[in-house]
Amino acid sequence: MKSDEELYMLFLQGHTECYDELMVRYGDALTAYLKGYLQSFEDAEDLMIEAFANIMAKKPKIKHGFKAYLFRTGHNLVYHLYVKEKRLKVFSLDDLNEECTSDGENFEDKLCNDEQKKALHRCIGRLDPDLREAVWLVYFEKLSYDQTADIMDVSKKKVDYMLTRAKVVLKRELEKEGYSGYA
């Protein structure tokens, strides 16, 4: 299997089918991430397509990996189209359980296959929006601190602080749920 960077370089050389493969790899994940901001799946899907189209049209040089650049593009689209119009609420995990992951497994089934994971999901939902977004990007999307910092437009140190803070809050919330020894 070719890496994201190999596929992107082949796309830049004129192999458009490689870009299609990148869309298949990350379309659902980006849509789920954008759904954390938006009220509807359709809006998230539209912005996902727009994010891919922007990259396809501009053909930028990508420094921190294709996935991180793609998520940053989606983040910027949300900001420019929704934050400025004050239609955006906050990053939310509440509706993400309806979305499918890239392997086709339902998000809720994957996250909540036992009671501990259900409790964790409830507790993550209680985090401040910025902390939830950092947790989502690092632990669910498996992005690096550098990539997450780039997407969220904060420093790597800030990402580290947000994740440390999120772990403290999650530990406290999990203890309220009756679980101990976490975070």
Image (tube, rainbow, N blue to C red):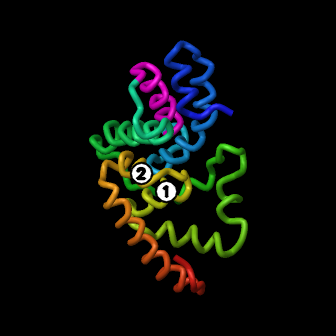
Residue range (magenta): 44-59
- Quarter location, residue 121: bottom right
Q: Give the percent coordinates (x, y) of residue 172.
A: 47, 82
Q: Secondary structure at mark 2?
A: helix
Q: Is residue 52 left or right of residue 75?
A: right
Which amino acid lies under the numbered mark 2 shown in the image of this protein? Thr
Up the image or down, 91 lies above or below 173; here it is: above
Q: Which label was assigned to residue 173?
A: none
Q: Secondary structure at mark 1?
A: helix
Up the image or down, 73 lies above or below 94; here it is: above
Q: Is residue 54 left or right of residue 118?
A: left
Q: Give the percent coordinates (x, y) of residue 34.
A: 48, 44
Q: Quadrant of the N terminus?
A: top right
In front: 90, or 138?
138
Q: Residue furthest top?
A: 14
Q: Is residue 29 left or right of residue 151?
A: right
Question: In the rendered image, which residue does mark 2 sit on?
Answer: 148
Membership of 55 in magenta stretch: yes
How far apart are labels 1 and 2 at the CA level?
7 Å
* Residue under the point 58% across and 31% down: 23
Type of secondary structure dominating the magenta stretch? helix
Which amino acid lies under the numbered mark 1 shown in the image of this protein? Val
Membership of 47 in magenta stretch: yes
* Residue under the point 54% across and 41% down: 31
> How busy is the neighbourhood of tag 2: few (under 14 within 10 Å), some, or many (20 plus)?
many
Q: Is residue 124 left or right of residue 152?
A: right
Q: Earlier in the sequence, mark 1 or mark 2?
A: 1
> How busy is the neighbourhood of tag 1: few (under 14 within 10 Å), some, or many (20 plus)?
some
Asked whether the beta carbons under mark 1 and mark 2 sit within 8 Å of each other, the answer is yes
Q: Which label was assigned to residue 138?
A: 1
* Residue under the point 56% across and 34% down: 4
Q: Give the percent coordinates (x, y) of residue 61.
A: 39, 27
